[in-house]
Image (cartoon, rainbow, N blue to C red):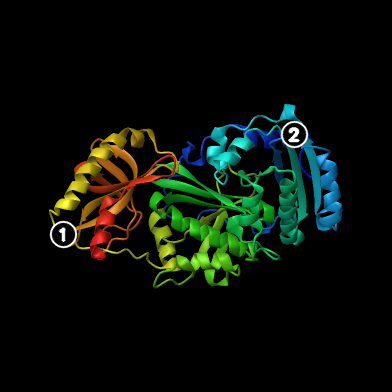
Amino acid sequence: MPFPRAPLAARLLGLLLLCLAPMAPAADKPTPPPADKADTAADTPFPAPLLHNADITYTFVILHPAPPKGDVVAEARKLLASKYKELAGAWKPGAPQPEVELQAVPPEELEPIDEEVLDFFGRKLDAGERKRLTQARHATVLAFHVPFARRNEALLAATRFAHQLASERAGFLWDAETREYYSPQRWKEQRLDGWNSGAPSLPAHITMHVYGEGERLRVITLGMAKLGLPDLVVEQVQRSMSNEVGTLVNGMAQLLAEGLELPEDGTLNVDLTRVKDAKVKRQLEAKMSEGARRSLKLRAIEATRDEGDPDNHLLEIAFPGSGTPHARQLAALDTLFGKQPDSITPVKAGDPELAEVARKARLRLTELKPRVEKGLRPPEELTVKAGFRTDDGSSEHMWFQVTGWEKDHLRGTLANEPFEVSRLRRGSTVSVPLKDVDDYLYTRPDGTEEGGESSRILMRRQEGR
């Protein structure tokens, strides 16, 4: 079939190497984000003609834990012809139709799936599903070729087709674009339920990788290629602001999927009130605070490619203005979503119960120091609370996310928006001696948490218990 790419055998080999070879988690990639840029005016605008890819290709893989009975490819072709006729066309110059190429993978070409791979790419599977998936020695590749004008209906049909085939064959699904494994049930719940026509709810069909060293992270989407759109990049994100930036990226992705155009000068007219998808709209509204304007102008520039990036056009979301990247990003987030509110609870100096919490926290942090120095690997995370001198000389106690440990000082980025410390903002870099730490919250490698006792005490007191 006339797919304008490498031969299927070569594509399949590359796919399997990506899919099955042990890989480091995205957060451990060694390449740091670029140095600070005072202004983005000199950056090259993203070429408007590249916003839409007229020739879309993507791949799903069905992995079979047990040897499949019969000819899976032949039966899949019958299923296409009978139930998914919109995918069973032939690519013709001038009038392209969606088409599907099917290929069985023999056992000798399929490397066993390692548990370490599933730690990062199989997080949507439970323990039993992971164990069964590691037994897969057979696979069926579904390669889709779609014109841009048919992107939404084709992706819906392709997602349904892959789900039905995996369900009938008791297999698992691999999305080569987002690099994720799914059970048929989870695939249906996340990607199909509630979607019957039009553009999908984008956060369900893409994923984000967040990685970097120290305080600065790089955020990049994977999966936008399935809709003929560029993947989105944000550089130099403060670690404590990654969730808010992720919300912005989801909103931007949804707007592009719903038809947002890009002027030649690269202006991104971000208006979150124009998001049509009800689910994404609710998610965005949940992040809004008082003063949120919900719209502003950003810039689309050509992104710098990094190792491991998706094989797709990359559009960097840039933040115009003066000041540091952190200041520009924070100003944009404040404009879109409003300043994020934080509560403040007065505490008398020398409170014995909280002093005991602080003593135990410092002891536990001493035990965790080697892990911090070695480098925490997601979902492992450490946040600590400490007092910061206010403008009037008193103390305001706030949380910051730890990114390093230097001698007796913990370094990180502020997670709270200060009330009375005008020199700091959420995301500011701070350094605090261990002796000044009040509490800690540690997320272990298995995702469970410990610490945070001071918050529970203050909450109990507020409730009068």
x 23%, y 41%: residue: 362
Residue extending furthest toward the left: 350
SS label for mark 2: loop
Q: Quadrant of the N terminus?
A: top right
Q: At 58% across and 31% down in the image, what residue appears?
A: 114
Q: Quadrant of the C terminus?
A: bottom left
Quarter residue 6 falls in: top right
SS class, disc 1:
loop
* CA neighbours of label 2 inside 10 A, class few (<14), some (14 to 19), many (20+): some
Amino acid type at mark 2:
Pro
Q: Is residue 2 visible?
A: no
Distance, label 2 to label 1, CA atoms, is: 69 Å
Instruction: Check disc 1 and report the residue beneath it.
Output: 394
Give residue 394's position: percent from left, percent from top.
16, 59
Q: Is residue 351 left or right of residue 172?
A: left
Q: Is 357 rendered above or below residue 348?
A: above
- Percent coordinates x, y for residue 173 in the rendering: 67, 44
Q: Which residue is mark 2?
A: 67
**x and y percentages locating residue 30 in the rendered image:** 47, 36
Task: Give amino acid for label 1.
Answer: Ser
Q: Are marks 2 and 1 in contact (CB under 8 Å)?
A: no
x%, y% of residue 275?
58, 69
